[in-house]
Image (cartoon, rainbow, N blue to C red):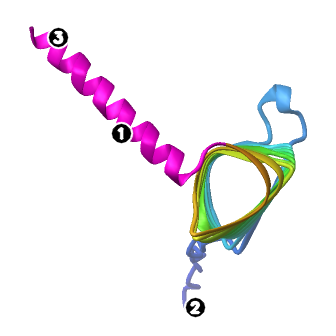
Amino acid sequence: MPEEKKRVPQRKKAATPKAVRVKAVDQKAGEGSTRDIKASAVTLSQSSTNTVDAKVVNAGQSAFANVTVGSLTAKQSALGNVEAERVEVTQSLVGMVRAEQVHLSGGGAAAITGTHITVDAGAAQYMIARESISVEQGGAIVMAAPHIEMGNGFVGIVLAREFRGNVRALLDQRGALVFGIAAGVVIGLLGFARRR
């Protein structure tokens, strides 16, 4: 009688997930938080994560430290460092954003750099764009772009070839130049006085 061969089950190779959905069940128990996520599409809801690397991220009431993404949409979230093609942030706080298209609505950021920046009822310390910045009811300490358009805003220092809008500026290009020269002279005199 021939012996029957036992079949050994083969292991399947682990594939990179196409979509990840993280939702907090009980944040006090620590659920809903993950360390690192890498996928094509990520949805975060009342969750936190350290890093996210994805094509599309949708976040609501979530927090993450580093995001590298094609498209990010976040509402009522806290974001650390964001690198993306397109970013749309509503009622959120952001550390640093680097993206081609940035839209900040009802939120704040430490720094925003990109090609086109649009801010509605929001503020940032620094806004630097390669093409344009459009702000409606918001402001920045430093704003630099070839084209800037503002409606009811405040800016500390403005650097632009073309500027339109209703704004209160602390320093324009000429004022910043005079301030820089004066600050250089004062610092030079203080350094000279110290050496004596």
Q: Which residue is mark 2?
A: 1
- The earlier-in-sequence mark between 1 and 2 is 2
Looking at the rendered image, the quarter that the N terminus falls into is bottom right
Going 82% across and 27% down the picture, which residue do you hit? 29
Q: Are marks 3 and 1 in contact (CB under 8 Å)?
A: no
Indicate the position of residue 114 as horizontal and vertical percent values: 59, 66
Indicate the position of residue 5 as horizontal and vertical percent values: 55, 84
Q: Is residue 79 visible?
A: no
Number of the label disc, if any, that sits on residue 181: 1
Q: Nearer the viewer, mark 3 or mark 2?
A: 3
Going 59% across and 80% down the picture, which residue do you hit? 7
66 vs 6, nearest the viewer: 66
Helix, strand or loop at disc 3? helix
In magenta, the rendered stretch is 170-196
Bin the neighbour count of mark 1 within 10 Å (Cα to Cα): few under 14, some 14-19, many 20 and up: few
Number of the label disc, if any, that sits on residue 194: 3
Bin the neighbour count of mark 3 within 10 Å (Cα to Cα): few under 14, some 14-19, many 20 and up: few
Number of the label disc, if any, that sits on residue 62: none
Kindly report the distance in space between the C-alpha atoms of the residues bearing marks 3 and 2. 103 Å
Q: Is residue 67 above or below residue 95?
A: below
Helix, strand or loop at disc 2? loop
Instruction: Answer left or right for 108 relative to 15.
Output: right
- The earlier-in-sequence mark between 3 and 1 is 1
The residue lying furthest to the left in this view is 196
Q: Nearer the viewer, mark 1 or mark 2?
A: 1
Helix, strand or loop at disc 1? helix
Going 18% across and 12% down the picture, which residue do you hit? 193
Tell whether position 184 is magenta.
yes
Q: Are marks 1 and 2 in contact (CB under 8 Å)?
A: no
